[in-house]
Amino acid sequence: MPTRNVVLSEHQQQLVETLVQSGRYQNASEVLREGLRLIEAREHRESAKLKALKQAARQGWADVSAGRYADVADDQLEDFVGQLGRRAAQPATTAR
């Protein structure tokens, strides 16, 4: 396994020491590997969110191009968004 030299701030060093002394981790390497696993998981979630947002944007623009949209007056926007929220919160019904 490759060895890396890592420079930590005083606060980070103290955190690593505290976690090791607590018995939760056997050494600093375990603490840092856990941190990297957390970063990897966060990056995966963020990537999935971005992919979903891009797909939603593509679908939205396709709907606009096909005329599948509703014009909403400024003074009705809050009510319209509230209706969308209530509709989204309702359990999905299956067609028979």
Image (tube, rainbow, N blue to C red):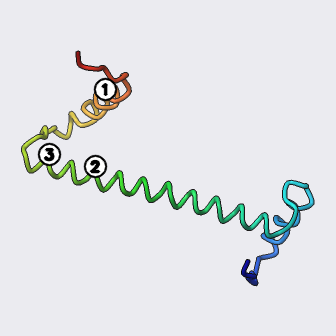
**Residue that mark 1 sits on:** 87
What is the distance, in whole Å, between disc 3 and disc 2 at their CAs?
10 Å
What is the distance, in whole Å, between disc 1 and disc 2 at their CAs?
18 Å
Q: Mark 1 or mark 2, which is nearer to you?
A: 2
**Residue that mark 2 sits on:** 56
**Residue that mark 3 sits on:** 63
Of pointers 3 and 2, the one earlier in the residue sequence: 2
Q: Amino acid at mark 2?
A: Ala
Picture coordinates of residue 20, whole percent (x, y): 88, 62
Of pointers 1 and 2, the one earlier in the residue sequence: 2
What is the distance, in whole Å, between disc 3 and disc 1 at their CAs?
19 Å
Label 2: few (<14), some (14–19) or many (≥20) C-alpha neighbours in 10 Å: few
Q: Secondary structure at mark 3?
A: helix
Which image quadrant for residue 85?
top left
Q: Secondary structure at mark 2?
A: helix
Between residues 36 and 76, which one lies in front from this camera angle? 36
Look at the numbered discs 1 and 2 and tell me whether their residues touch, using CB distance below 8 Å. no
Picture coordinates of residue 83, whole percent (x, y): 28, 27
